[in-house]
Amino acid sequence: MNPLVEGRPGLARVLAALDGDGEEARIVGGAVRDWLIGRGLRSDIDIATTALPEEVTARAKAAGLKPVPTGIEHGTVTVIADGEPYEVTTLREDVETDGRRARVVFGRSWAQDARRRDFTMNALYLTRSGELVDLVDGAADAKAGCVRFIGDADTRIREDYLRILRLFRFHAAFGRGPLDPPALAAAIRNREGLDRLSRERVRAELMKLLVAPRAAETLAQMQQAGLLAPVLGREGDVPAFVRLAEVEAALGLAPDAVRRLGALTVREASEAQALRAGLRLSNAEATRLEALAGPAPTPGMCEKGQKAFLYRMGRDAFQDRALIAFARAGAPLDDEGWRALAAIAADWPIPAFPLKAGDFLKRGMAPGPELGAALKRAEEAWIEAGFPMDAPALAGIVEAAVG
């Protein structure tokens, strides 16, 4: 019995449609690796097949499944079963590469398909019946936490220079012990190839690396090898990143890629703007990084001041600044002041300003710039007073603002 099929009737239907009558289909890659090392079952399942895309499409339709030609030029058809998508890709061989993309031809050799993949732990197959097929000693590497290139490391990197980043990302996610020496040496030798990659692909790999379990030590190794600056456009503040990871863990917070990128790179708005262009960040990501520039809340501020800071900045920006400031301060992880600041950032219910234009119109003010100025004065007075909500206090604030 295939352990990845249990509880997945849709996957069973896909494999039944594609495996047989002269063709074979196997689960491949990350899902097999994660199951093998006890990481649990992934939501995304990739399938490799000897069948050509048109045959995959025909068989899927005949079985009552929905085929979608998501990457037909590369041999990939996404088959929808019970609402779940499964990427089905025809066995391939690379015939030409330029360091960014490959020209492939379809084949029927499982050995050739395995040899074109990047790391041994990613070239594992599981048959429909549940037999593990390992053609490159990937099972042993996966269990040992060794991220090793298939074949010659320099050759594999020059086929696609993104594999330099993938080496570190997979080491941060699955590695144990030091980086594979031949892989690290090849990455250093081929570092100039990073400049040939699209920034979008670099960003995607980097953001995954930043939240991996061993991200901190892996980034330190990248910096030492001279491979972090070409990715970030500058040297990274790795000690701040390491400390932020410790702070997040101590406070029970999930790793956050954007916040961690900020700790690594941003102290001024100009640095956030450079990252926006250099990594093709989304508007939301860039805006969040830009919000890190400027003064940060500290335990030295009174609680009233902290809450005023939080109200003006918003919860996300306040929390990002507070946690990064905690990390850069070098305070003990059990420091009560910093922990209290983090608790305010997470738990204090930010009140909504209760006064509206109508409250001032009732006092005889006319619509226009003066009304807007009065509302602004009232809001500042409300913040200074500690966010009161009782009617007498609000009436006094309106009175003073109309003044």
Image (spheres, rainbow, N blue to C red):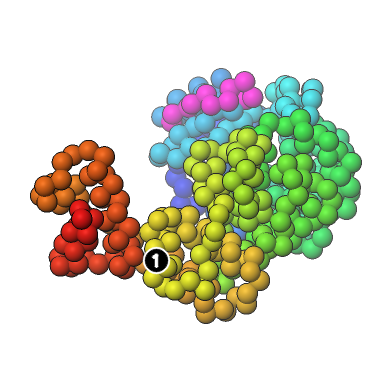
Of residues 385 and 259, the one nearer the viewer is: 385
Residue under the image location 24 percent in, 43 percent down: 370
Quarter-wise, where is residue 372 in the image?
Answer: top left
Residue under the image location 39 percent in, 63 percent down: 308
- In the rendering, at what x and y percent does residue 97 appear? 79, 25
- In the rendering, at what x and y percent does residue 79 appear? 49, 32
Classify 271 as above or below 311: above
Of residues 181 and 70, the one nearer the viewer is: 181
Residue under the image location 56 percent in, 48 percent down: 289
- In the rendering, at what x and y percent does residue 165 appear? 73, 44
Q: Within 10 angstroms of label 1, few (less than 14), some, or many (20 or more) residues?
A: many
Numbered label tally:
1
Which residue, given by chain and number where applicable, does mark 1 sit on?
307
Does the stretch in magenta take in 73? Answer: yes
Q: Is residue 35 visible?
A: no
Q: Quadrant of the C terminus?
A: bottom left
Of residues 160 and 341, the one nearer the viewer is: 341
Classify 154 as above or below 393: above
Write down the region rendered in magenta: 65-75
Quarter-wise, where is residue 140 in the image?
Answer: bottom right
